[in-house]
Image: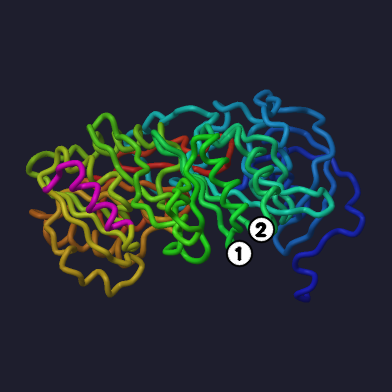
Amino acid sequence: MSRGTANRAVAGGGEPETEEVVGLTHAGEGIVRAGKTVFVAGALPGETVSFARTRKHRQHDEARLLEVLRPAPERVTPRCPHFGVCGGCALQHLAPDAQLALKEKELRDNLERVARVEWRTWLPPLRGPVWGYRRRARLGAKYVPKKGKVVVGFRERLAPYVADLLHCDVLAEPVGTLVQPLAALLGALDIRQQVPQIEVAVADKATALVLRVLQAPTGQDLGKLRDFAARHGVRLYLQSGGLDSIEELQPAEPAANEAAAARPSSPSLAYALADFGLELEFAPTDFVQVNGVLNQALVARAVELLRPTSQSRVLDLYCGLGNFTLALAKSAGYVVGVEGERGLVERARHNARRNGLSNLEFHVGDLSKPAELAAGWLAGPYSHVLLDPPRVGAAPDMLAAIGRRAGSDPGGAPQRVLYVSCHPGSLARDLGILVHEHGFVLESAGVVDMFPHTAHVESMALLTRP
């Protein structure tokens, strides 16, 4: 097969076909086994649908849903009028309880098929609001000459365009209702064609919007931006280059010239972990868990499962700005956090000082590189380990380091390891290594509904020593 035929559109669309849907992909598309496997966006397991193939790949085809001939009982009418075009959601046509059941099934299937492990206890799912929950997002912006306006939204699901949204029901307020006002603001700027992206960060008491600007705003533009920020009670930032170029747009001052109108601001966005009496500050582009309510529940369950005491020494890997670290330090004897991004480590140290905690320390370390595992912080001993790696999972050398300590130093080895995951496949792979190669037992596992209406599966698993 030539490279040109590996991924091609079907000329004029394929002929209509009718089949039953047997499952969902990781992106929330219906799976049809009809000779070559077909992915049908908008189709649900158990349904009989009519579809037409639109694009061919080596291993599967893509198809357009023509008609649902026999709907699944869990099918519901999507709340958002943009559903199906906007790529921000994939499962609004499936009832929330059914979404959660599918995510639990995906986690179980991965643990059984990939990890080949059994769990002693299945944790009840952590649930929260299914609308207005998303406090972090990256929105696209695009001036469309044919429409004579700027459109703001997530990328379209089946095309490389920015979806033209009126509002967004999953974005946290006030941003959910500010999508169209933002589009109107950008459309009124002289640099309307030079603002391709908006980063959203909703804190407990403030909202930040970071505008990526490819050209400096004019004086008139700055006035319009300040007026928008004042009218809607948001904080606007301008990003002209890398992350170090982000500057907060300050209110106009009589004695200030335009060159001083935008100046750096220390991070004062914050969210609370009320169960632990903590408040964590973050910068507008820092990684924080998307769902604030679920994050509080996630941290509380993590501490509950790890059960640290005043005698415990805890290692928190991929610790970010201290989301788990600070909460663990409330009951553990000592906690060591390790994170690859220097800015987040600085934020974590600041948050520890701000909350009056001294029984912890933070280190910068790229946990994907074996050389980092020779660092002094790994020496321990540690009684507990928490790891919350990115989507690709933990580095094999990191897992081996945890396993070696558990196998060679029973007196000072981790007895409880909690793995927080954003991808069930990489979680299952890593749990299989820890169980089959290093002697851990999968004590419990369960899902966290961090991203309702998407196919994203967040989960956690507790490992113990037999």
Vertically, is 287 above or below 451?
below
Q: Residue furthest front?
A: 255
Say which quarter of the image contains residue 126. top left
Q: Residue visible at 57% across and 47% down?
A: 225
Q: Position of residue 28 (x, y in %)?
A: 63, 43
Q: Residue visible at 64% across and 30% down?
A: 94
**Residue 438 or 244: which is nearer the viewer?**
244
Residue 356 among those drawn in magenta: yes
> Which residue carries the number 1 mark?
215
Q: Position of residue 204 (x, y in %)?
A: 39, 34
Extent of the magenta region: 344-358
* Chief SS of the magenta region: helix
Horizontal relation, residue 259 to residue 397: left or right: right
Residue 273 among those drawn in magenta: no
> Which residue carries the number 2 mark?
191
Q: Secondary structure at mark 1?
A: loop
Q: Secondary structure at mark 2?
A: loop
Vertically, is 451 above or below 389?
above
Q: Position of residue 270 (x, y in %)?
A: 35, 40
Contact, CB < 8 Å: mark 1 with mark 2? yes
Say which quarter of the image contains residue 378. bottom left
Horizontal relation, residue 321 to residue 161: left or right: left
The type of residue carrying mark 1 is: Gln
The type of residue carrying mark 2 is: Ile
